[in-house]
Image (cartoon, helix red, strand yellow):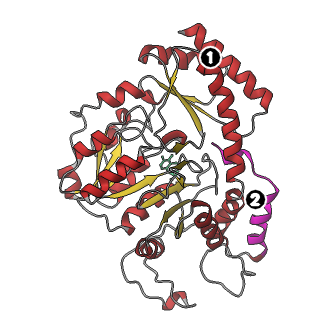
């Protein structure tokens, strides 16, 4: 997945453009900036690549989720359905707005289980937020039907699956809103950055204003602009956007490399009868950022994960015990450990997650191992890795 592997002449040239003028801010300073608008250009490039009307760049993927929710009017007491397997940013963004994260089970896609989503809907539910973890997607067709039936928004977190698609549409563009992260370990990077995409004119206006203190961005004098509503600062800098502008042009090149490397590893593991693979919903094409597979049970998965590490096969993750990506270690959420007082709606409505039954999630995640697909491997290195993985797995199970 990591775009950080490739920082080259194209990235340097884009950053140099910005350094020449010294205008590091995305807004204003028209006379001094030599007509360089890196953030705006990256938004245009994203709109084109993702086949949507609007893109809004922000300072991170977490900011993208927060601004996306805010742009759709989500606030105190609104409930947002999210998966048990994701990054902590999912509930951080929801809580930042005073809204309530409602965790539900994942299935063999390693993403939101549509049945569990439907069971969690009540009159306070406003958003369903699937997270396309590790390069593959939720069953967006079924989730969209559920959202239409209950009048809910579908917000795709595509931070780990940029470049994948569903029914021919780029991931992130299928729902009402989609979010990307360009942090340093994502498929393409800005250093730090994120984006929201949508086809909704009002969400774009809201996201544009909200991410810059509510500035209406009318006219050429920032100080004279009005502020139609409260906002915050989630701006990206021109330096970060410049790196992303070089990287977006390489997205398809990166996805192709990931696919080649993934396929070599997968072919080697397909031959092991005890190994099976996550389900990709009909109509989905992965971004191949990771290869995720199931072992027969938790004990075997733990043993295999340990053996892979000992055998020098790096960058393989066992999410079941992970501090950041699985609900079992989110005791700061469960116990609402915050620095200051939290909104009453959140305290009153947050389910008691110590009493929740997420055994369906545990069933799948406890036997899952995900291996990061790197871009910089030579073909010989991938072949060697594939052989080694297969040998280690066979001798461990
Ligand atoms: C990385 C990531 C985020 C947050 O992105 P940042 O840019 O690091 O804030 C959100 N969701 C998922 C699934 C991620 O992997």
Q: Say which label, 1 or 2, has the lower sequence index.
A: 2
Residue 304 appears in which quarter of the rendering? top right
* Residue 121 position within the rendered picture, expressed as x and y whole percent measured from the top left: 22, 49
Q: Which quarter of the figure is the N terminus placed in?
A: top right
Q: Is residue 100 left or right of residue 169?
A: left
Q: Mark 2 packing: few (<14 Cα in 10 Å), some, or many (20+)?
A: some
- Kindly identify the residue that appears in the image at 62 percent across and 27 percent down: 266
- Image coords of residue 377 (percent x, y): 75, 34
Residue appearing at x 60%, y 63% in the figure: 46
Return the x and y of residue 274 as percentages of the image width and height.
Answer: 51, 14
Say which element carries label 1: helix
Say which residue appears at 61% left-offset and 74% top-offset.
26
Q: How would you rate the neighbour count of disc 1 (Cα within 10 Å): few for under 14, some for 14-19, many for 20 or more?
A: few
Residue 383 visible at all:
yes
From the image, give the main secondary structure of the stretch colored magenta: helix
Q: Is mark 1 within 8 Å of ligand 1?
A: no
Q: Magenta segment, which residues?
A: 1-20
Helix, strand, or loop for circle 2?
A: helix
- 384 horizontally vs 218: left or right: right
Task: Give me the residue at 40% from left, 35% from top.
Answer: 326
Please say if 123 is above or below 305.
below
* Residue for badge 1: 310
Residue at the disc numbered 2: 11
């Amino acid at each position: 997945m990591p775009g950080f592997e490739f920082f080259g002449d194209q990235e340097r040239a884009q950053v140099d453009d910005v350094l020449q003028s010294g205008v590091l801010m995305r807004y204003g300073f028209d006379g001094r900036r030599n007509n360089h608008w890196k953030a705006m250009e990256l938004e245009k490039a994203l709109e084109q690549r993702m086949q949507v009307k609007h893109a809004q760049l922000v300072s991170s993927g977490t900011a993208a989720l927060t601004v996306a929710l805010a742009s759709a009017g989500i606030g105190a007491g609104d409930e947002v359905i999210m998966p048990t397997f994701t990054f902590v940013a999912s509930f951080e963004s929801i809580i930042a707005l005073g809204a309530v994260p409602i965790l539900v089970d994942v299935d063999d896609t390693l993403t939101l289980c549509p049945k569990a989503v439907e069971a969690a809907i009540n009159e306070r539910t406003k958003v369903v937020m699937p997270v396309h973890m590790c390069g593959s997607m939720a069953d967006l067709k079924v989730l969209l039907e559920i959202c239409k039936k209950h009048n809910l928004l579908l917000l795709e977190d595509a931070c780990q699956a940029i470049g994948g698609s569903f029914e021919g549409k780029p991931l992130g563009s299928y729902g009402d809103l989609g979010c990307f992260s360009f942090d340093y370990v994502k498929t393409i990077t800005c250093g730090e950055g994120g984006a929201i995409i949508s086809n909704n004119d009002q969400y774009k206006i809201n996201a544009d204003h909200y991410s810059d203190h509510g500035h209406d961005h009318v006219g050429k004098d920032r100080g004279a602009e009005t502020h139609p509503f409260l906002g915050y600062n989630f701006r990206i800098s021109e330096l970060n956007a410049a790196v992303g502008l070089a990287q977006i042009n390489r997205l398809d090149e990166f996805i192709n490399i990931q696919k080649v490397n993934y396929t070599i590893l997968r072919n080697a593991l397909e031959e092991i009868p005890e190994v099976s693979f996550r389900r990709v919903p009909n109509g989905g094409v992965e971004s191949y950022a990771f290869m995720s597979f199931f072992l027969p049970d938790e004990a075997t998965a733990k043993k295999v994960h340990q053996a892979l590490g000992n055998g020098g096969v790096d960058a393989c993750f066992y999410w079941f015990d992970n501090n950041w990506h699985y609900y079992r270690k989110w005791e700061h959420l469960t116990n609402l450990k915050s620095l200051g007082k939290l909104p009453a709606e959140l305290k009153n409505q947050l389910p008691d997650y110590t009493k929740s039954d997420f055994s369906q999630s545990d069933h799948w995640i406890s036997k899952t191992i995900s291996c990061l697909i790197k871009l910089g491997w030579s073909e010989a290195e991938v072949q060697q890795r594939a052989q080694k993985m297969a040998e280690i797995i066979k001798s461990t199970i």
